[in-house]
Image (tube, rainbow, N blue to C red):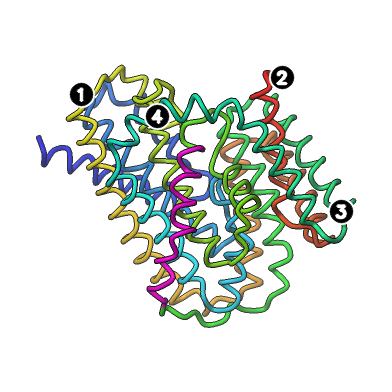
Amino acid sequence: MFLELLLFLLIGILLGVVAGLIPGLHPNTIAFLLLSVSPLLGIEILCLIAILVGSEITNSFVDFIPSILFSAPEEDTALSVLPGQRFLLSGRAYEAIYLTVCGGLISTIVIALIFPLFIISIPMLYSYVKPVIVILLILTIVHLFWTQKKNKFSALLVFVFSALLGLLIFHLPLSGSEVMFPAFCGLFGLASLFFASSKSEIPEQEIDVNLEDCSKKKSSLVGVFSGLIAGILPGVGSSQVTVMSQQLLKIKNLKDFMISIGGITTATSLFSIVALWTIGNPRSGTSVAIQSLAFEPSLSTLFIILFMIVISAGFGALLTLSLSKIIIKNIYKIKYNKLTKSIFIFLFILVGVFTGWIGLIIAITGLAIGLFCIQTGVRRSFMMGVLLVPTILIFLGV
């Protein structure tokens, strides 16, 4: 049984790599596709869970490769685009990816070590945090405007139009995960690529990294506890808690930011699965898929799932570093302006394939807001109004 579980876990890890490298292909898509064909394949429930867990956790690591190297973000990695570009254009893209891997691994290790404590404390924490999450989100928005020293009116426009876009897209005939892809592609990916195309080439990249950077305790702990909040609260994802932690805890150093966002993304994926059995509510497409299996785990089975998570994180980290190293060693040979233009067109094609003409309209609208944001010198965090305002309204029952 152990070898069988390991085999299915490795299949999930492979699917997580594929989903991570292809923008727009999300583990949620894989999860529901797998559920639709599983009755025909006759796979045991625990083996199905192994595939789903492997895909979800591995994807949380690999997702940063296209986000940092090609400005092609998913919802969880959108905020890494601008810092990632800075690392890329200074010849340190591998360091940026390495830092996100550090954050993800540290989050996994910390959570694994005190897993029994989380099992006991998550229901209690959930009851305390849920009533004040609106206040925290509002404080985050206030702090965003407070720290924007210049172009405050432009910042207001960016935030308002992003919020309006967020309110509109959730009323469209697409699922939540489907509308997020074109929205974040437009706001963050396509807008960055539009201006990045003026660069003639990517500088030769360094592969050396400073191992001491991974020992930054504040950034690592921010990843764990911010991921915990995102993993257990409905309507709050990695992007929202990244903005909250960045603003409220004043994380300004780029290295600290990359570690924290890597930790938050992995911890969110992990806690979204754990929350299914601690508070009885799924927090991601993968956990919804697992819930549909009507699986009631024993305490020993929960620890088997934790083992799957740790193995997936280890493979996800190694594969992310290996694949990114291969890509980075060759990427500087390519003309950057041609590459960015090609990726710009490719993302539009992906948006059209996955979300149709509605998605294309969302992406173009997001692109317009993103271009205005960059052109006026407003911080990209203001575009997170696309999620912050709908989240606040959800918690207020509007």
The secondary element bearing badge 2 is classed as: loop
How far apart marks 4 and 3 lie (CA) works out to 39 Å
Q: Which residue is mark 2?
A: 398
Residue 275 - label: 4
First in residue order: circle 1 vs circle 2? 1
- Residue 45 sits in quarter: top left
Left or right of 181 in this view: 9: left
First in residue order: circle 1 vs circle 4? 4
The secondary element bearing badge 1 is classed as: loop
**Magenta span:** 209-229
Q: Residues within 10 Å of mark 3 (few under 14, many from 20)?
A: some
Q: Position of residue 51 (x, y in %)?
A: 29, 37
Mark 4 residue type? Ala
Q: Which residue is mark 3?
A: 152
Task: Tell me whether the residue at label 3 lies in contact with that at label 2, contact meaning CB atoms closer than 8 angstroms.
Answer: no
How far apart marks 1 and 3 lie (CA) works out to 54 Å
First in residue order: circle 3 vs circle 2? 3
Q: Is residue 223 magenta?
A: yes
Asked whether 2 or 129 is in front, the reply is: 129
First in residue order: circle 4 vs circle 2? 4
Residue at x 68%, y 22% (from the top left corner): 396
Mark 3 residue type? Lys
Residue at x 57%, y 43% (from the top left corner): 241
Q: Is residue 196 magenta?
A: no
Mark 1 residue type? Ser
How far apart marks 1 and 2 lie (CA) works out to 38 Å
- Compared with residue 86, is residue 111 higher up or lower down, i.e. above or below? above
How far apart marks 3 and 2 lie (CA) works out to 28 Å
